[in-house]
Amino acid sequence: MAQRYSAEKTFVSFFSKASVEDIKAENTKAVSMFDATSGEVAYSVPIKDFKFAKSLMQEHFNEKYLESEKYPKSTFEGKIVGFKGLVEGVQQVHAQGKLTIHGVTHDVDIPGTLEKQADRLVMKSKFMVKLEDYKVRIPQLFWKNIAEQVEVTIDFTYQPK
């Protein structure tokens, strides 16, 4: 019998360190499913739900960089590798699969952890994304404001479905 989990709490953030100004945004509206029997995992992050400290940054992010009207979500579909089943404690794992951002899909291998906490599972990961790999263009005028790659943090808490 499959052991399926759905995310009850999600947190996705990205951080861009640049010479002029650091940029950080957070999103708690992602949805995700995890099948503990097969190791399959999928998630979808609505781009418009990233929140910034400054509204102008949020506007530029949605209109100029990620074009959220045209590309409303980022997705991942793949498998958790190194998962040793529903055992207590933190497991070092990798998510291998297809990451889609800005309409561009790449095969990725993302390190992370999976921890069983009572009847819940917590998945965490921190990884770098190169903007040019996903055809996110930075206008020449802003090249000092935005780093060429951003650090993405994911923290999902799953409950049995």
Image (spheres, helix red, strand yellow):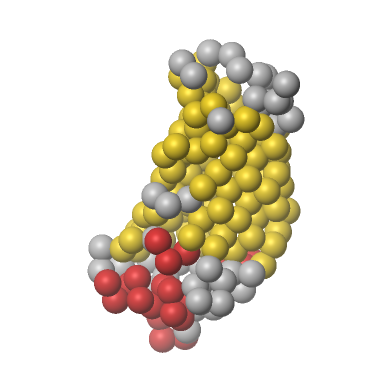
Towards the viewer: 121 or 53: 121
Q: Residue at x 64, y 60 (%)?
A: 100
Q: Residue at x 50, y 38 (%)?
A: 7
Task: Identify whether 65 is placed above or below 148.
Answer: below
Q: Which residue lies furthest to the left in this view?
A: 54
Total numbered badges shown on the rendered structure: 0
Task: Identify whether 161 is placed above or below 105.
Answer: above
Quadrant of the drawing holding the N terminus: top right
Look at the image and tell me whether residue 113 can be seen: no
Quarter of the figure with residue 130: bottom right
Q: In this view, does 77 lie to the left or right of 10?
A: right
Q: Which residue is drawn at 70% across and 53% down?
A: 98
Q: Is residue 40 left or right of residue 49?
A: right
Q: Residue at x 70, y 25 (%)?
A: 2
The image position of residue 123, as x and y in percent, is 52, 33
The image position of residue 109, as x and y in percent, is 68, 45
The image position of residue 121, as x and y in percent, is 51, 26
Towards the viewer: 53 or 23: 53
Quadrant of the drawing holding the C terminus: top right
